[in-house]
Amino acid sequence: MALPLPSCITVYALILQLLHLSSISNNVLTAAKHSYSASHHHHRSRHSHSHSPVPNPRLQQAYIALQAWKHVIYSDPQNLTTNWVGPSVCNYTGVYCAPAPHDPKTRVVAGIDLNHGDIAGFLPNELGLLTDLALIHLNSNRFCGIVPETISNLTLLYELDLSNNRFVGPFPTVILSLPTLHFLDLRFNEFEGPLPSELFKKNLDAIFVNNNRFTNVLPATLGGSSASVLVIANNNFGGCLPPSIASFAHTLEELLITNTSLSGCLPPEVGFLYKLRVLDVSDNKIIGPIPYSLAGLAHLEQLNIGHNMMSGLVPEGVCVLPSLKNFTFSYNFFCEEEGICMNLTSKGIVYDDRGNCLPEKPRQRSEKECRGVNEHPVDCFEYICHGGGSSFGGQAAAFAPAAMVVPSSSPLLSPSAAPSYT
């Protein structure tokens, strides 16, 4: 049920013209709207290539770059780069040529797609010679090392997918200098350190940075991007979700922050994200009640707040959301379900309420565990986040040990076999 992004129609048309591959345009839209779906691994039919024995200067430059890249590929079990021989680069496997956008008579290398190649090697500095690239897809290989600074020369780059590799080092800030980048996928690598706040100010349609080693706290200035999908799960940020998340209100449709050591209360500003279809903050250390503002998320289909330390009641306003299909609030400390929340099955909603303090419901916590929480209710107005971090009193700590013994509910977000929420 992917919907086109009106603000990007002109840009998508430009990419379609550049690549002459209609299937690329369809997959760009799909990948930007669906966070976990494996459909963003693109399968494209090859188009006709130039067989000119004498390449133009831009193809000659591409030849130098691709030969340098082949030289630092140590393993290619599928022999994808075996035919990377000679100056006719448009005949190379995984290399796609098209007329230059401002010079239709000149043929250039417009895209590289080596997805699922299991190739081992690294990215050479000569990659910066491929200045006409609109997309790079390297998902599911064994590329390692760091992202070269010369990638800043790729001023036409629209999609960058480096997911499921072995890249290391801090967040590659050189990516932030790419003026036309709209799709960024860095998930399943070994990047570490903080995420730069500038990342959330770029005009990106989709941001995937999950399953890395990112730490520190989420930037206090989170927001300002045009992203419809934001996946930062399975890292180790800590701190709390900053209220500035409301800056994504006009575009964000999927927000997934699973297993990132978030603490503090869920800010009411999450309820300002009126376009949200998927909200997943499970497997964290979030405390306090469910914000009543979530009752305004009319498009919300999937809500997962399971495996936290939240408490209070499950409000009816959430349970009657018109689009809600799946509601997971298991392994928290909720003590009451309001109204129709007691019988979500009657609304056709798939739900999981295990491991709470709900009276007369099966598979709940012990009376001893629940008593400690009920005696110390959390008032979220008492806790203030500073710079993305959090400042909490003893109430949360009083029941933290009990919450930490629950089993994990969510698998790693695999790029090849991940659940789809749509």
Image (cartoon, helix red, strand yellow):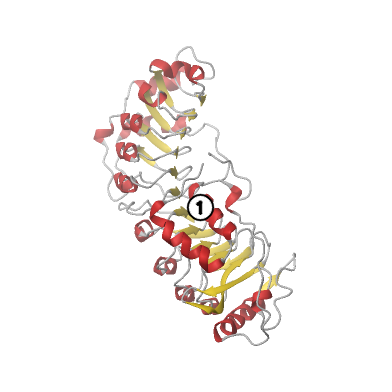
Pick whichever, 300 or 264, lies toward us.
Answer: 300
Q: Residue at x 51, y 32 (%)?
A: 405
Exactly how many numbered labels are in the figure? Answer: 1
Residue 186, percent from left and from top: 51, 58
Q: Which residue is mark 1?
A: 29
Q: Disc 1 residue type?
A: Leu
Q: Residue 170: x, y in percent?
A: 46, 64
The residue closer to the viewer here, 403 or 54, is 54
State the residue lying farthest toward the left: 382
* Residue 226: image location, x then y, percent: 37, 53
Q: Looking at the image, is 158 positioned above or below residue 231?
A: below
Residue 23 picture location, percent across and down: 59, 57
- Left or right, 313 with respect to 407, comes to left
Q: Residue at x 56, y 54 (%)?
A: 27
Q: Quadrant of residue 26?
A: bottom right
Residue 72 in sight in this render: no
User: Furthest residue to the top?
Assistant: 360
